[in-house]
């Protein structure tokens, strides 16, 4: 079953962790069906730790184990009772992106599906900005796709240079190492089908293509998101004009009465 929305379904943002994981896998598969034999799309994985609404450092583990301490616990060492601490939850978020690598494991292109933990909180934004800088300094092509509305703008394309007609709820941009003085921005309106985004490879090679609509349709179907409660408003809420449009759309399709 398909989403009632023609393009991005804003209700998927509430389950972004699951959706993001599926997007990464499906994008890897879609790209590998197009790449030359000596290139491969692979999934890179890190764990970002969230402490009290701020995102801190990243780890690259083989495996991680998380244990939450019980309330009111005290630490005792050598018979001496120490002061009772304030215990804050550390919530791990697995960060994944797709890398296109050659036969020598040299990264040619990185594909980032931007997540709330890249956009919410100063530390998360700063860490993502460092990652962008590292990509560009290493001569890596970068494709960024932002399908979440919460948080601040973080794409590599300068925010102040994007004209008003391109300022849609979702955006994508492509940086080509062969053209370091420019970046391509793609509008992604809520009310339209998701676009196909070019994925640059090596100089002289034809771009691969990410068919975003197909990726989201697969996520929606395989995640059984037809069970979504469309009678409530999405989180974060839509702007008034979009909310009115969504209400009409959902009523016409029988999701609201």
Image (cartoon, rainbow, N blue to C red):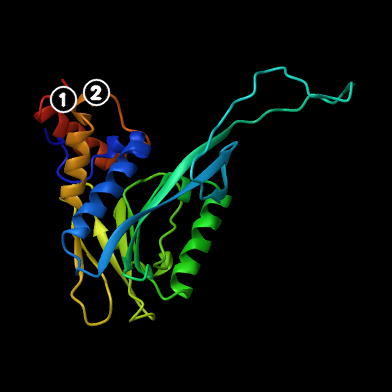
Q: Identify the element where label 2 is drawn.
A: loop
Residue at horizontal 37%, vertical 67%?
A: 105
Q: Nearer the viewer, residue 248 or 52?
A: 52
Residue 126 falls in which quadrant of the image?
bottom right
* CA–CA distance in space, label 1 to label 2: 7 Å
Q: Residue 231 location, x and y as percent?
A: 24, 23
Mark earlier in primary sequence (1, 2): 2
Tell me the tag on residue 231: 2
Q: Note whether 113 is above or below 180 in the view shown.
A: above
Residue 255: mark: 1
Q: Are marks 1 and 2 in contact (CB under 8 Å)?
A: yes
The residue at 20%/32% (across/down) is: 247
Q: Quadrant of the C terminus?
A: top left
Residue closest to the eye, 221 or 152: 221
Please identify the quadrant where the N terminus is shown: top left
Residue 34, percent from left and from top: 16, 63
Q: Residue 135 appears at what percent x and percent y?
A: 44, 68
Residue at 28% across, 60% down: 41
């Amino acid at each position: 079953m398909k989403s009632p929305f023609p393009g991005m379904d804003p209700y998927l943002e509430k389950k972004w962790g699951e959706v993001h994981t599926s997007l990464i896998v499906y994008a890897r598969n879609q790209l590998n069906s197009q790449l030359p034999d000596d290139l491969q799309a692979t999934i890179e994985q890190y764990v970002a730790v969230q402490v009290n609404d701020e995102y801190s450092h990243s780890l690259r583990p083989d495996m991680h184990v998380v244990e939450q301490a019980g309330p009111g616990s005290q630490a005792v060492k050598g018979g001496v009772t120490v002061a009772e601490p304030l215990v804050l939850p550390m919530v791990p978020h697995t960060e994944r992106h797709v890398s296109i690598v050659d036969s020598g494991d040299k990264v040619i292109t990185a594909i980032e599906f931007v997540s709330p933990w890249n956009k919410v909180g100063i530390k998360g934004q700063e860490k993502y900005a460092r990652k962008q800088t590292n990509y560009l300094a290493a001569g890596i092509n970068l494709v960024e796709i932002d399908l979440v509305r919460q948080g601040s703008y973080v794409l590599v394309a300068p925010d102040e240079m994007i004209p008003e007609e391109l300022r849609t709820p979702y955006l994508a941009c492509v940086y080509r190492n062969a053209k370091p003085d420019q970046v391509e921005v793609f509008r992604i309106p809520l009310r339209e089908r998701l676009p196909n985004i070019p994925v640059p490879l090596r100089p002289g090679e034809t771009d691969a293509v990410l068919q975003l609509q197909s990726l989201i349709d697969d996520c929606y179907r395989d995640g059984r998101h037809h069970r979504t409660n469309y009678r409530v408003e999405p989180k974060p809420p839509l702007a008034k004009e979009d909310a009115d449009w969504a209400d009409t759309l959902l009523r016409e399709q029988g999701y609201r009465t």
